[in-house]
Image (tube, grey):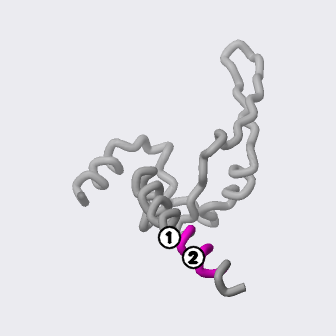
Amino acid sequence: MKKNKLQKLEDMKSEYNFSSMKGAVRGKYYKAYRDGHNVVIHKSDGTTSIQYFELEDGAVMLEPDVRKYFPNSESVNKALKLLIEIIPSKRRASNHRK
């Protein structure tokens, strides 16, 4: 696995290497990105177009600490389905207490 990460770093173009950036803040625009964002595209013919992007319906952004445990959609869905199975039993128990 370490070899794959190393290979990816070697294949990365030098202009994409952000390791030497001082003062960079990871996740600085995280919340704004979740709310939607504009992308300005400067074309070679001198024109500019602006496209607005937002999360697709049903898309969910996981926080970094959660992503450690749920690296893909399959793992998230599996965990949520397990939680869904226990919800009705808790609701029934709380209704009997009243």
Q: Quadrant of the N terminus?
A: bottom left
Q: Residue 91, percent across and down? A: 62, 73
- Label 2 with label 1: CB-CB less than 8 Å: yes
* The C terminus: image quadrant: bottom right
Task: Tell me the amino acid under the disc marked 1.
Answer: Ile
**Image x and y of residue 65, in percent:** 51, 70
Q: CA distance from mark 2 to mark 1?
A: 7 Å
Query: Which residue in the rendered view is the most extreme toward the top?
Result: 45
Name the outermost residue toward the bottom: 97
Picture mark count: 2
Horizontal side of 3 relative to 25 (left or right) equals left
Foreground of the two, 63 or 5: 63
Relative to the observer, which residue lies in front, 68 or 84? Answer: 84
Secondary structure mainly formed by the magenta segment: helix
Q: What residue is shown with label 2?
A: 90
Does 41 appear in magenta? no
Q: Name the residue carrying label 1.
A: 86
Identity, as a three-letter code, of the amino acid under mark 2: Lys
Q: Which residues are magenta?
A: 88-94
Q: Secondary structure at mark 2?
A: helix
In the displayed structure, 73 sits above or below 26; it is above
User: Which of the 4 quarters of the picture holds residue 37?
Assistant: top right
Q: Position of residue 7 (x, y in %)?
A: 27, 48
Q: Secondary structure at mark 1?
A: helix
